[in-house]
Image: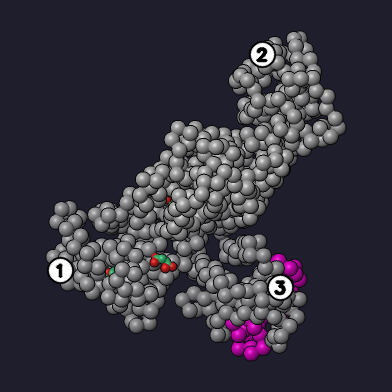
Amino acid sequence: MKKILIVDDNAQNQYLLEILLKTHGLEVATASNGIEALEKAHQNPPDMIISDILMPGMDGFSLCRAWKTNEALRNIPFVFYTATYTDPNDEKFALSLGAERFIIKPMDPDEFMKIMQEIILNSETKEQVVSIGTIEKEEEYYREYNQTLIRKLENKMVEIQKDNKRLLSFYQLSSNLAKIKNLPDLIHSVLCTLVETSGYEQVSHFSYDEKQRKLFLMDAVGVSEKELTANKDRYVFSIDEEQSLVGVAARTKKIINIPDTTEEPRWIVHDLKMNSALYVPVLYEDNLRGVIVLCSNEKGAFAKEDEHNIATLTNALAIALENEKNQQKIQKQIQRLSALHDIDLAIKGNMDLRATLNILLDYVTKQLQADAADILLYDSKSQTFDFAAARGFNTRAIENQNLWQGNSVAEKIIITQCKLHLNNLIEPLVPSAFAAMCASEKFQNYWGVPLVAKGEVKGVLEVFHRSSFTSEAEWQDYFETLAGQAAIAIDNAQLFEELQRSNVELRLAYDATIEGWSRALYLRDKDTEEHVQRLVDITVELAKKMGFKDADLVHIRRGALLHDIGKMGIPDHILLKPAPLSEDEWVIMRKHPQYAYDMLSSISYLQKALDIPYCHHEKWDGSGYPRGLKGERIPLAARLFAVVDVWDALRSDRPYRKAWQDNQAIEYIREQSGKHFDPKVVEAFLDLLKIKRFD
Ligand code: C2E
Ligand code: SIN
Ligand code: SIN
Ligand code: FE
């Protein structure tokens, strides 16, 4: 059996990969950083190594270099498997070190396994070549290495900033929604969010007065908002006006997309010097409530997806107009979930501060010809130091707190915020513990520099020489540049840690949020929580019986909990109708799975939970909705939920009929096997009912 060594500091990534490889008949060993990987490989050489890049201790690039310059290991294939934000130069660098492949996450498991098999096969048949294009020259290696790492840090920073900004507007919107008591403010806040997050230059809202058959400008945000809102009486249009785009969008209740305003005769001056525009009717249950107009400087700025997204948003707005209180809550929950999705993205390529600093120190010692270097972190609130990383020391004395806590050299640097040079490291010129450490390490020369980012001291970088050392101006410059980089790395990582912390908090709030969300629906549906909980429990039982793994059950649970969330979009007079639905009403009712998909599909946490909300009304014989899927094309989770849902629906009172008897319901399920339901699922379900009683 072939053995693969996985190197990843993230336990979850490690685990996922391990499972994938093991299910393909491979043996797996794991390590959480480069050093551990080298140790394990020397004890028991694998047939291939798969490594992440950023890890504490020793990163993937260093590992690859060590691997490919080692006689015993160099012929074992080395594969990088890393997060999505890498750029093509990373791959180039990795291959120049001798790596066989550079794979970017996430990759389709089948494709991933195909590549793995290929590499293993190749390495068996390949002549055992001695060296593969490894960068031999130290200088060149470190130049490339440094550039690659800085690029990674920069990417990370941009990513975090971007996510923070988006996060901010979502949070603003959701917290505003919670506070806002009147509708104009609510709409204003939605318009602001649209302008901030979409990048369009201008958004305005017209509201429709049914009696006068006229549309009135209510609000505008973005370019010219003052002129527009100060002259509202000029912007009144009749719904019957042929020449008004606002009027036409209102009358036809259709979106109008004007990709090029210069070619549109109905375009009028008030609409500003914008080059494209989108007119979106605000509809509630097909009743006109108003029109939203979006404008952009760019020609053809509004793609089909924008139409869809904005229509979804205005739809939400229309519902908010109707049912402000209830909807405020739902909107807020949607926003919170979207925010979670963003944080999730930011966290994907998680980064470890100590790993980064270790890499940096490697570089510091090489480039500054230092014998040893360390970084201490400083917490300005508690005024304490914390050891972060060290290179080149013979003992671990530097990790001892007594060395830098209290009246120390490092403290002096923090207080003066100045670089400090010492070439006489004895008492009483330096504190005794420090002098003792220097003596035992045979240090003769010391340089320390404060690490300052955004005006705040983050720590101290110290370098030691064992010989007498005279520094030149160039060395000094370089020393300061590296200190600046270390400070940025620390600041960046602290930002990142904060994000991770808040993500943990949000994750806790997250499942509670879905439950709250579904509860809002049950309240409206006059259903009870216990009832829904039971439905979920039975579904999970059946899923276990049908062989779903534990890891899938959480998604099944969420899917079952949210199965009818799309009914949020179904008006009361249809949902609660105490009689059979008309054909028109059925058209709307059958949209509820699609509504669920539209609401949930952008939320990464719920990707795997989508099958049930989206496909629970598909039927085995292909006669179901929304897509008319047939047989095994219907996701298994949805096939099994369908049985539980119908069985449960039949045994419950509905506004349109009384509950059926138990045996009647079971008879119906049996009778529909092979028609509505998957026969295998029916069999398993009936078995389950024999063992357990659910009432
Ligand atoms: P629901 O009430 O939760 O019903 C879920 C599914 O159980 C139904 O999906 C159907 O497959 C099955 N089911 C429920 N009651 C009966 C019944 O009396 N006879 C039979 N043979 N099957 C039943 P379906 O039909 O796609 O309906 C989806 C949703 O549409 C229902 O969810 C309910 O909210 C609504 N709906 C269905 N029929 C009516 C109706 O006559 N009046 C009203 N107001 N709503 C209805
Ligand atoms: C989770 O289980 O918390 C999220 C998994 C996913 O995003 O699919
Ligand atoms: C899709 O097909 O886009 C959604 C996946 C599913 O639930 O079948
Ligand atoms: Fe349903």
Q: Position of residue 401 (x, y in %)?
A: 62, 19
State the residue in front, 84 or 251.
84
Amino acid type of the residue that numbered disc 2 sits on in the rendered structure: Ser
> In terms of sequence position, does the residue under pointer 2 or pointer 3 come before the other?
3
Is 224 part of what is drawn in magenta? yes
Secondary structure state at the residue bearing disc 1: helix
Q: CA distance from mark 2 to mark 1?
A: 86 Å
Label number found at residue 667:
1
Secondary structure state at the residue bearing disc 2: helix
Amino acid type of the residue that numbered disc 1 sits on in the rendered structure: Glu
Q: Residue furthest top?
A: 428
Residue bearing mark 2: 440
Q: Residues within 10 Å of mark 2 (few under 14, many from 20)?
A: few
Label number found at residue 199:
none
> In terms of sequence position, does the residue under pointer 3 or pointer 1 come before the other?
3
Residue bearing mark 3: 298
Q: Position of residue 671 (x, y in %)?
A: 17, 72
Q: Is residue 670 visible?
A: yes
Looking at the rendered image, the disc whose residue lies closer to the viewer, 3 or 1, is 3
Q: Residues within 10 Å of mark 1 (few under 14, many from 20)?
A: few
At x 56% / y 37%, what residue is drawn?
Answer: 70
Q: CA distance from mark 2 to mark 3?
A: 68 Å
Q: Which residues are magenta?
A: 222-249
State the residue in front, 164 or 143.
143
Q: CA distance from mark 3 to mark 1?
A: 62 Å
Looking at the rendered image, the disc whose residue lies closer to the viewer, 2 or 1, is 2
At x 40% / y 76%, what residue is drawn?
Answer: 588
Q: Position of residue 182 (x, y in %)?
A: 57, 62
